[in-house]
Image (cartoon, rainbow, N blue to C red):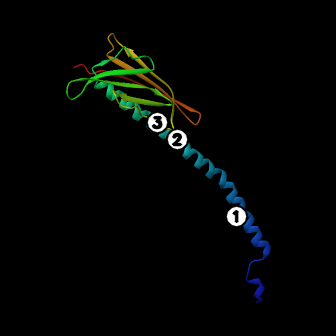
């Protein structure tokens, strides 16, 4: 037997390499699509988590309030009156500050309820009843040119 017959020829190595490159290059678009879909899902999850957290905070504060403070409340701002632990009136405001939903307690600095990644494009409060005993909250959010709309209605707790 001749010794040069035991190995691979240059043509075989080039053929195997070409086939391997064709197989790998056909899978690259699939993997890129999977990665893009994963990142889009993560961005959507972050937007919805932010919206849910903000909506839960607003709903909780509405439920524990005794009334809507109408002199400062408008369609884009909600002012609530509640009682603190000393049974004194405390005012809480929700409004759109910059591109975030902000919570401002009386005599304190505003606290953003949404992250910087999420852009809140519209925030509306619709008071229901006379005097208002329920509030419908509508939030429009945007992230990477995708828009999201969430809404919730919460009733005030009567003391």
Q: CA distance from mark 1 to mark 3?
A: 42 Å
Work out whether 118 lies above or below 29: above
Indicate the position of residue 58 as horizontal and vertical percent values.
37, 28
User: How many C-alpha atoms fall within 10 Å of the one at disc 3: few (<14), some, or many (≥20)?
Assistant: some
Q: In this rendered view, identify the residue nearer to me: 59 or 89.
A: 89
Q: Is residue 17 left or right of residue 120?
A: right
Question: Residue 120, image x and y in percent?
Answer: 50, 30
Q: Which mark is drawn over residue 20?
A: 1
* Residue 141 image position (x, y, % from top left): 51, 30
Examine the image and state in which quarter residue 94 appears: top left
Q: Is residue 19 left or right of residue 138?
A: right
Which residue, given by chain and number where applicable, does mark 3 sit on?
Answer: 48
1 and 2 marks in contact (CB < 8 Å): no
Residue drawn at point x = 76 percent, y = 88 percent: 3
- Disc 1, SS: helix
Circle 3 SS class: helix
Q: Is residue 3 above or below residue 32?
A: below
Q: Earlier in the sequence, mark 1 or mark 3?
A: 1
Q: Which quarter of the figure is the N terminus placed in?
A: bottom right
Quadrant of residue 19 within the rendered picture: bottom right
């Amino acid at each position: 037997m001749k010794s040069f017959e035991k190995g691979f020829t240059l043509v075989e190595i080039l053929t195997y390499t070409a086939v391997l490159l064709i197989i790998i290059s056909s899978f690259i678009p699939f993997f890129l699509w999977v990665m893009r879909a994963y990142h889009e899902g993560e961005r959507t999850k972050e937007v919805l988590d932010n919206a849910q957290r903000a909506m839960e905070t607003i709903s909780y504060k509405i439920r524990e309030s005794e009334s809507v403070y109408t002199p400062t409340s408008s369609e884009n701002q909600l002012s609530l009156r509640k009682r603190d632990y000393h049974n004194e009136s405390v005012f809480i405001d929700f409004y759109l500050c910059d591109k975030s939903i902000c919570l401002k307690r009386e005599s304190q600095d505003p606290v953003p309820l949404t992250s910087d990644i999420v852009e809140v494009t519209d925030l509306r409060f619709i008071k229901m009843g006379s005097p208002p005993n329920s509030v419908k909250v509508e939030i429009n959010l945007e992230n990477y040119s995708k828009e999201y709309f969430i809404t919730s209605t919460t009733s005030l707790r009567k003391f």
